[in-house]
Structure formats: structure tokens, C-alpha cells
Amino acid sequence: MDAFKTHRGIVAPLDRANVDTDAIIPKQFLKSIKRTGFGESLFFDWRYLPNGKPDPAFALNAPHLKGASILVARNNFGCGSSREHAVWAVAQYGFKAVIAPWVTREGTRVQGFADIFKNNCVKNGVLTVELAEAEVEEIFQMAARFKGMEATVNLEEQRVTLNIEEEISFHFEIDPGVKEHLLRGLDEIGLTLEHDAAIKSFESKHDNQMSAQK
């Protein structure tokens, strides 16, 4: 997968909480045995009218959001089933990063992202950024005020910057291991292959020992 270091792109606001994976990529699109072609079906039931034409009332269909690559939503994004297709759809649409807030409800902290969705994002090179609720609210407000607003996501500095006249920045936390995965563009297989020589050496010694015992 591609390394993620710094990305600048248009911010697309999706003002919805608890967006589940069936909303991200409906079940009828899971029949494909390929890992490509899911981007056009992202948020299918929301993006399209029954006649198949784009729904002009859906936020992401707005002309000024064409080519958007940073998605901002409300809390608990990616909940529901564990389908990795949801992340494939997000990535293949063109989103490089997804921003969502953690919130506190009745003394309980609700995460910005469902755990399985978040882990699947790491495997596919998509950065999930979790900010405080007030910070995400400010992003929504700025996106509404500045149509087609761009932002820069800097993973090395762990910072999101809104590229408006008076820049606004937000720091985010991220697991060091996840950060390394994304910065180096390596999934679990890639990290394992870095130890290819040691693995082959172990296998060779093991085979020799087994042969000597016969």
C-alpha cells in the first residue's frame, strides 16, 4: 500500500453519526470476488435516487466537493459488520483520511470509529483521525462557511490544518505502531517480508535438523 505522510485535499462533511458499514457499502455489492470497483457504490443508498441518478440533496454530491479526499463525519463511524469492503469503498472513492470525534454520552466515552473498521483502514492505507467533538464541530462550521475548503493532514506531526485565510490546526493522537505502518506504507504482510532472510534461515535450519533425525 502507499505510504501516508502528508495529504492536502478538499474536506467533505458528512453530518451523520453511527454510519454503519451497510450504509457505507450496501450488502448487494459484496458479491464481487474482486477488490476493485467499490468506490462508485460508496454510500449508494444515500448518493443515488431510485432512478440511478445522483441525489442532489446528498452532501457529497455537491459540485464543490467533487474530488474530495478528506471525509469528516460524526462519532462511531464504521460500526456494524466487519466487512473490509467498507474501507475499500472509502479508499477507492478517493478518501485518504477520515475524521470523526470521540464524544461523551452519559459518562461513557464513545469512539470516533468502530474498532474493526479502524483496523481495516490501517491495512488499506486510510488514516483515521479522532478529534474532540468541539474540534470536529468547528471543521463542520468552517466547511459550511468556506465551500470546497481544503485541509492538510500531516501524519508525522499528527496535525490537521484547515487551509483557510486564518489557518486553524488540531493535534491528534495515534498509536505509534499504526503511525509507523502508515508512514512506511507497510501492512502486516509487508512487515513480515522485511524479515524474509531470517525466516528462510530458520526454515533451512529446521529442514536440516529434521533431515538429520531421519
Image (cartoon, rainbow, N blue to C red):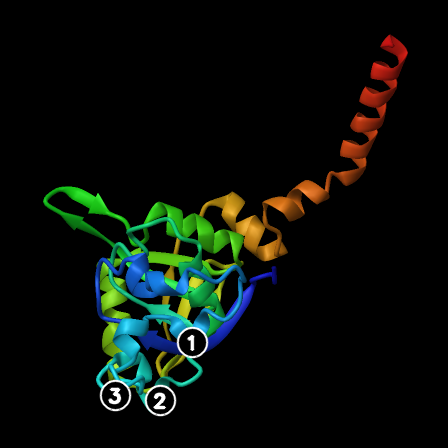
Query: Picture quarter containing residue 61?
Result: bottom left
Q: Is residue 181 left or right of residue 170?
A: right
Residue occupying the point 59% across, 49% down: 187
> Would residue 134 appear left or right of 115 to someone viewing this image?
left
**Amino acid at dot 3:** Pro
Q: Nearer the viewer, residue 37 or 62?
A: 37
Q: How far apart in space, not on screen, are marks 1 and 3 (Cα)?
A: 16 Å
Q: Give the crowd class for mark 3: few <14, some 14-19, many >=20 residues within 10 Å.
A: few
Residue position for label 1: 40
Foreground: 20 or 70? Answer: 20
Which residue is the site of mark 3?
A: 56
Considering only vertical position in the picture, is 15 above or below 148? above
Amino acid tagged 2:
His
Nearer mark to the viewer, of 2 and 1 = 1
Single out the mark in the foreground, 3 or 2. Answer: 3
Find the distance from the CA under tag 3 to the CA under tag 2. Answer: 12 Å
**Left or right: 54 in relation to 9:** left
Residue 103 x, y percent position in the rendering: 21, 52
Q: Residue at x 40, y 65 (%)?
A: 29
Going 23% across and 57% down the picture, which residue do you hit? 18
At 36% from the left and 84% from the top, the residue drawn is: 65
Q: Tell me the CA gap for discs 2 and 1.
A: 18 Å
Contact flag, marks 3 and 2 (Cβ < 8 Å): no
Q: Is residue 166 above or below residue 6?
A: below
Image position, residue 190 (x, y; %):
66, 48
N-term-proximal mark, 3 vs 2: 3
Q: Does any portion of residue 25 appear in the rendered image?
A: no
Residues at discs 1 and 3 in contact (Cβ within 8 Å): no
Q: Check residue 64 in the rendering and tell me which mark sits there, or answer none.
A: 2
